[in-house]
Image (cartoon, coloured by chain):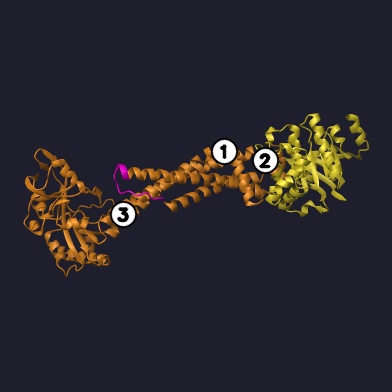
Chain colours: A orange, B yellow
Amino acid sequence: MTFKDTFKTAFKGLWANRSRSILTILGIVIGITAIILIMSLGKGAENLILGQIQSFGSKTIAIIPGRQPKGPTDVIATFTDSLKQKDLEALEKKNNAPHAVKIMPVVFGSEAAAFENETYRPTIFGVTDLFAKIYDIYPVEGRLFTEDEIKSYAHVVLIGSKVKEELFGENEAIDEKIKIKGGNFKVIGVFPKKGQFSFLNFDEIAVIPYTTAQQYVFGIKYFHRLIAEADEEKYVPQTVEDIRITLRNSHNITDPNKDDFFIETQAEAMETVSTITSVLTLFLVAVAAISLLVGGIGIMNIMIVSVTERTREIGLRKAIGATNQEIMTQFLLEAVMLTALGGIVGIILGGALSFIASFALSRVLSLDWTFVFPISAALLGLSVAALVGLVFGLYPARQASLKSPIESLRYE
Amino acid sequence: MTLIRVENLEKTYYNDGVQTPALKDVSFEIQKGEFVGIMGPSGSGKSTLLHILGFLDQQTKGRYFFDGKRIDDYSPKEIARLRNKKMGFIFQAFNLLARTTVLENVKLPLLYSGIKESLRNKMAQEAISAVGLLPRIHHESSQLSGGEKQRVAIARALVNKPNVIFADEPTGNLDSASGQIVMDILERLNEEEGQTIILITHETYTAEHTQRIIRFFDGRIESDAKVDNQRSAKKFIK
């Protein structure tokens, strides 16, 4: 019997019981749909997060006070005040970190801002004018603050679009004064609408010189972050090392295990995110795979019923010359065709659902979400589905092939 | 020319340690072109014999030569191929595939015989024409009467041009008129095409179409005789 004939015969066998066949593959369809959906959305989420990290600039290096957590019991915030002005000055010395072209201290926190009767609670960023460059956000109205204003602890502020809307509505904001922590800050610039980016909503920020933020708003002498930028991407690892040595010297640290700061680069952050999303996706896929197992058992069950039901047909086929092998192939192919069909439907359904979900996420939540159709997942899903058919179809098919033609022909 | 020769054939069924002899010391020969009726009461071993002759079962003792070769010389796969190419089966219960057309049913053995797809329709049509069912070729088997179903089964048995057709009570499920048509077809195949047919029956009017009747009783051949009054008996019945 040619493969084409076997295929046709198997197809006819399934077609004769089409409603049952459809119900049988439902388990497989759901399993594959879930897997495709999870993998597609997982990839989409990963791309979104990676994209946001990437937007931070591949040459950017973040110096964070404290120790990098080594485990769940590790206390992260042990040395949160370890980055000080002298560190900034040390890093700015050219011979310490020759490839670090820009270094920006960052202090931040949430504080109430008020204008007349309106109040809003933006995230206050105390930074330098490098902020605009590093985050690629420039005021649509007004200007950035100057180096002189930083040095002179000037009370100037740039506000995000949401902050402007909340405090001023449609009115002009430039040159008005808003109250933050008792101080009057002159609005010198308004940022354009940018939305969520790099885990930060840029529409809800108020940006002031870091000196002013330390002195008048937060009352601290340290920085929450130091952001450095290497002149070229290839010098990032070297710069990280330079910074590490400089800061250790500055902090009199000899034992690297006692570092009171840690350094994150975009590459590391991307790696971390990739690992987290991959593990999460894998876990969810494993959960979804359980439904494939259940689906496979369903297939086996129905195939056993089908083989019993068609005992006479099997007997007849044998009597007119089918070999055991041919009977086995026929029933095995039926099972594989069932599950493969379930796999195909699942892939289409999963793809369609994740497309809809991507669309909804990008429209409703205005996220920069892209639809990813995981071709590898689709191929994997199809092969897994076929494999399920092969594994769970084997036993019933073997039962069919071993039937005695005489007994089978007599079967009532 | 001898097509089938059995020597001292014995068959014993073992069921939960209980021995049930079904055939005891059976020997006979069947020549090409013969139309043999095998008769006997139920339990006399005639179905067992047919199964052994049709390669569906194996004897416990004795020797069986088909076309000059012993069955033991064949592998299971070759046996399946022999059943496909050299034997045709007709069953009491027709055993047609449900929800399948006459044409597809008749083509079924051709699927297993490696015959080119382009040839299959032609061969099937010839066989269907031989049983006079061409007008019903595209009907599903469930739309046919009992007699027509059995004629489809005959066409299916014929389609591979077998050396021998085994018919196990082919008229058992039919009314006498339909049974008569079926027997006429078998007789014509034997007379005109020289088709060897081995027929199991317990109905005398069916057996009267044959040329030779082997009677079984209790697993043994009771009598083996040519039917000399074949024609006259049939005419008498008509």
Residue type beneath disc 3? Leu
Q: Residue at x 22, y 55 (%)?
A: A135
Q: Which residue is mark 1?
A: A18
Residue type at tag 2: Glu
| B80 to the left or right of A222 | right
Q: Earlier in the sequence, mark 3 or mark 1?
A: 1
Dot 1: what SS? Answer: helix
Residue A16 inside the magenta-drawn segment: no
**Are discs 2 and 3 located on one and the same chain?**
yes
Amino acid bearing label 1: Arg
| Residue at the spot 40% in from the left edge and 46% down from the top edge | A38
Q: Nearer the viewer, mark 2 or mark 3?
A: 3
Residue A50: assigned label = 3
Above-or-below relation of B227 to A82: above
Residue A283: image location, x then y, percent: 39, 48
Reading the image, the residue beneath label 2 is A313
> Which residues are drawn in magenta?
A362-373
The extreme bottom residue here reads A95
Q: Secondary structure at mark 2?
A: helix
Q: Is residue A276 left or right of residue B90?
A: left
Residue A175 image offset from top left, x and y in percent: 8, 48
Q: CA distance from mark 2 to mark 3?
A: 58 Å
